[in-house]
Image (tube, rainbow, N blue to C red):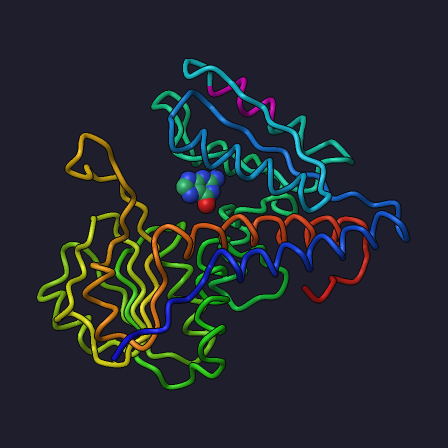
Amino acid sequence: MTATVIDGKAIAAALVAGIAKTVERLVLTQRLTPGLAVVLIGDNPASTVYVRNKVKQCELAGLRSQLHHLPADVREDDVINLVRGLNGRDDVHGILVQLPLPPQVRAAAVIETIDPAKDVDGFHVVNVGRLFGGLPGALVPCTPQGCLHLIFSVRRDLSGLAAVVIGRSSIVGKPMAQLLLDENCTVTIAHSRSADLPAICRGADLLIAAVGRPQMVRQDWIKPGAIVIDVGINRVADGRGGSRLVGDVDFAAALTVASAITPVPGGVGPMTVALLLRNTLIAACRQRGIDEPEV
Ligand code: GUN
């Protein structure tokens, strides 16, 4: 079997094009330009690349964006005061504080300060509670939403499937498991300490790898015909003095067993940004009391 390679770049581009159309209509008919404020602290190279891309994609889709770049030694109070100021601005509908943060700034304290209506990452306890409580109105974390979208591109009905999520982070693993549960999957959350991880993975019709370990998932961990979603973005040496990005799955080997698989790069990564734009659009409409658009 040669797996279908799920083209996250193309699927994200289609989603962003739909968002851009909706934004154009909102600007014309409602005089509403959704606005995203991104807070970047320090100069972590990966974070800098991600944030630059988020701001660029906003501009391409017609959203307004503003980048607040703070020094690595900024005081926690100053970050909190910045977020409070953004909460109060009518032209800012979404606030994203790029993680990780330097040690003197507690992520929990900063996230707690974000107005839940503007929490486009879906990290605030109010949004987490809505998602896990099955309550309406949650802003849902972007990466797991993006993964679900990619799964739907190859299979719409997930009911009854055995899903295994490797990774238990609050950003990906846990919300991913909840979204799959909502689709009537039987969900297992596995992690680096799970006993016999390969055996757990072999039972998965749907395997989502989000552990951050380069090419950890081997060919014989994958059930023939499984759908494999690779959330990992790991930089490894390329053997020629440079580096390259690989996922958490041994992609070349998995291609021969899975029915569908996402590549790295060009799989989940572009979807995270597209769903961030969508969350910002949704947040803007809710704040204005406008019906949520179908995008
Ligand atoms: N760092 C890595 N992924 C994310 C994300 O989805 N949101 C934020 N704010 N920081 C991140």
Instruction: State the quadrant of the C terminus.
Output: bottom right
**As drawn, 158 above or below 220:** below
Image location of residue 4, percent across then percent down = 37, 73
Magenta part mainly helix, strand or loop? helix
Q: How many marks?
A: 0
Image coords of residue 259 (percent x, y): 31, 77
Residue at point 14%, 65% (across, down): 197
Residue 176 x/y as whole percent: 40, 62
Give the x, y percent position of residue 122. 53, 50
Q: Which residue is found at the position 29% from the left and 69% from the top?
A: 207
The outermost residue toward the bottom is 160
**Residue 80: in magenta span:** yes
Task: Kindly indicate the quadrant of the structure image that contains residue 291.
Answer: bottom right
140, above or below 89, in the image: below
| Residue, far front | 240
- Which residue lies at the image location 60% right of the left edge and 29% below the top edge? 83
> Residue 151's quadrant in the figure?
bottom left
- Which quadrant of the render holds ligand 1? top left
Q: Is residue 89 left or right of residue 118?
A: right
Left or right position of 42 against 15:
left
Q: Is residue 170 magenta?
A: no
Residue placed farthest to the right in the image? Answer: 29
The residue located at (42%, 66%) in the rendering is: 6
Q: Residue furthest left?
A: 196
Q: Name the image quarter holding the N terminus.
A: bottom left
Q: Nearer the viewer, residue 89 or 200?
A: 200
State which region is magenta. Answer: 76-82
